[in-house]
Image (spheres, rainbow, N blue to C red):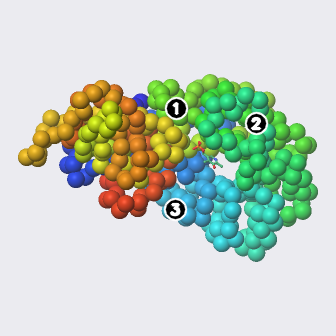
């Protein structure tokens, strides 16, 4: 939903202006959503949460009961996630793993490595021999497969199906898979194939990708235990009510698992799990007219919520009117219907949403940006201009231990 939940709304209105902006997370909303996602999926499909979407410890913890593990893409995420949610299965992926990161992952006993290149495989094999004697380290080979025709139509970011630094080329991946199966790397155990090809895909597109990845993975006569078909389920910032069709996706995956009873299928969503549970709340500082258009300047900006600037969208938002006005000078107010919401940075790029219907918007009113639970605070350039950081509020923590 785009409107803040009642608890979020109450919190936004009760915070003193000096405590804004603030990131407000509704952990009950997150648990409900994650539970619905889990229910929509066949039991035999595993879910790993891609921690880079939002690694706040409270978020990682709230997701705990609904996921089978976590995907981490750096040594920093690895250490952070292992501490925040101890003893949970971790998959270590991402390009450019350093030898130190690989050693740390081996010492931590990471469950799976997603190998991004042949060079990385050789490094991992040697470090596994030295750092993890007596055990075989589990690997999935990440492959940059062609994406089925049409499946990329709606994608905003493509990691596969074109030249990218991610994964192995298909032909080379086949050689690597055969070499692993032949025992060329005695300290490594081939578990399967990993493919995260694009993000921003609808359920039908995701299923087309899943089918083509599984058919490729099972087509080489090498028995595999697992296929990880990645994340990238769409979040529609232009229409927050339009949600990824988890039940349609679940039914499609059920057919795929029935066709391949020998395989464990795994998905690793990030954005579509956590985007909806976070809000960035702030206060209007000033409203003015410029060359015929209304602008509101809010406390904070894209140094806290970079998502609309990086993705080129208007962040969905709602206005909470505040009648009280504490200052002895008059409020500024919008004369027109449509107001562009800008932040405090000295750059025209610091725009959170353009031409938002907000007739009469005044200084002192509050604005709550929704869909701010993923790739929001953690992808932003916090120190630019040295404004104070936002507050953080995690509402409705579970009381049952879940
Ligand atoms: C970022 C990433 C994900 C999660 O993608 P979303 O679009 O957030 O679902 C999953 N797997 C890998 C390898 C990634 O890099």
Observer-side mark, 1 or 3, equals: 1
In depth, the one of 132 and 115 nearer the eye is 115
Residue 24 versus residue 252 in the image, above or below: below
Give x and y (percent) for residue 151: 71, 30
Secondary structure at badge 1 equals loop
Q: Which residue is painted at 58% across and 61% down in the image?
A: 78
Question: Where the C terminus falls, by quadrant?
Answer: top left
**Mark 2: few/some/many CA within 10 Å (<14, 14-19, 20+):** many
Rendered image: mark on residue 110: none
Secondary structure at badge 2 equals loop
Query: Hey, which quadrant is residue 74 in on the image?
Result: bottom right
Of callouts 2 and 3, the N-terminal one: 3
| Pointer 2 residue | 147
In depth, the one of 360 and 150 nearer the eye is 360
Secondary structure at badge 3 equals helix
Mark 3 Cβ inside 8 Å of ligand 1:
no
Q: Whole-Å distance between the Cαs marked 1 and 2?
A: 21 Å
| Pointer 1 residue | 236
Observer-side mark, 2 or 3, equals: 2
- Residue 90: in sight, yes or no? no
């Amino acid at each position: 939903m785009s409107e803040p939940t009642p608890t979020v709304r109450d919190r936004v209105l009760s915070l003193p202006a000096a405590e804004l902006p603030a990131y407000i997370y509704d952990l009950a909303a997150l648990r409900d959503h994650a539970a619905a996602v889990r229910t929509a999926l066949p039991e035999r499909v595993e879910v790993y949460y891609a921690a880079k979407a939002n690694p706040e410890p409270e978020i990682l913890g709230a997701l705990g009961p609904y996921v089978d593990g976590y995907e981490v893409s750096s040594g920093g995420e690895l250490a952070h996630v292992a501490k925040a949610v101890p003893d949970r299965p971790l998959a270590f992926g991402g390009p450019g793993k350093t030898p130190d990161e690989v050693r740390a992952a081996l010492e931590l006993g990471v469950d799976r490595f997603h190998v991004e290149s042949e060079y990385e495989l050789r490094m991992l094999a040697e470090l596994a021999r030295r750092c993890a004697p007596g055990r075989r380290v589990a690997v999935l080979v990440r492959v940059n497969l062609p994406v089925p025709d049409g499946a990329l139509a709606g994608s905003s970011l493509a990691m596969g199906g074109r030249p990218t630094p991610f994964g192995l080329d298909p032909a080379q991946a086949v050689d690597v898979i055969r070499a692993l199966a032949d025992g060329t790397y005695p300290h490594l155990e081939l578990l399967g194939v990993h493919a995260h090809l694009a993000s921003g895909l609808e359920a039908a597109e995701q299923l087309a990708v899943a089918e083509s990845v599984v058919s490729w993975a099972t087509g080489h006569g090498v028995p595999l235990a697992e296929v990880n078909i990645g994340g990238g389920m769409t979040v529609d910032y232009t229409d927050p009510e339009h949600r990824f069709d988890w039940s349609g996706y679940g039914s499609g995956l059920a057919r795929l698992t029935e066709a391949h009873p020998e395989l464990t299928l795994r998905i690793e969503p990030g954005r579509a799990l956590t985007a909806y549970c976070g809000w960035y709340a702030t206060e209007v500082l000033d409203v003015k007219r410029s060359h015929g258009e209304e602008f509101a300047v809010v406390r904070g900006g894209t140094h806290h919520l970079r998502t609309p600037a990086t993705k080129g969208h208007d962040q969905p938002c709602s206005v909470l009117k505040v009648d009280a006005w504490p200052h002895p000078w008059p409020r500024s107010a919008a004369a027109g219907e449509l107001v562009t919401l800008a932040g405090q940075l000295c750059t025209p790029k610091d725009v959170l949403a353009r031409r938002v219907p907000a007739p009469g918007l005044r200084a002192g009113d509050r604005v709550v940006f929704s869909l701010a639970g993923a790739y929001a605070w953690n992808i932003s350039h916090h120190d630019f201009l040295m404004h104070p950081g936002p507050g953080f509020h995690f509402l409705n923590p579970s009381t049952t231990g879940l």
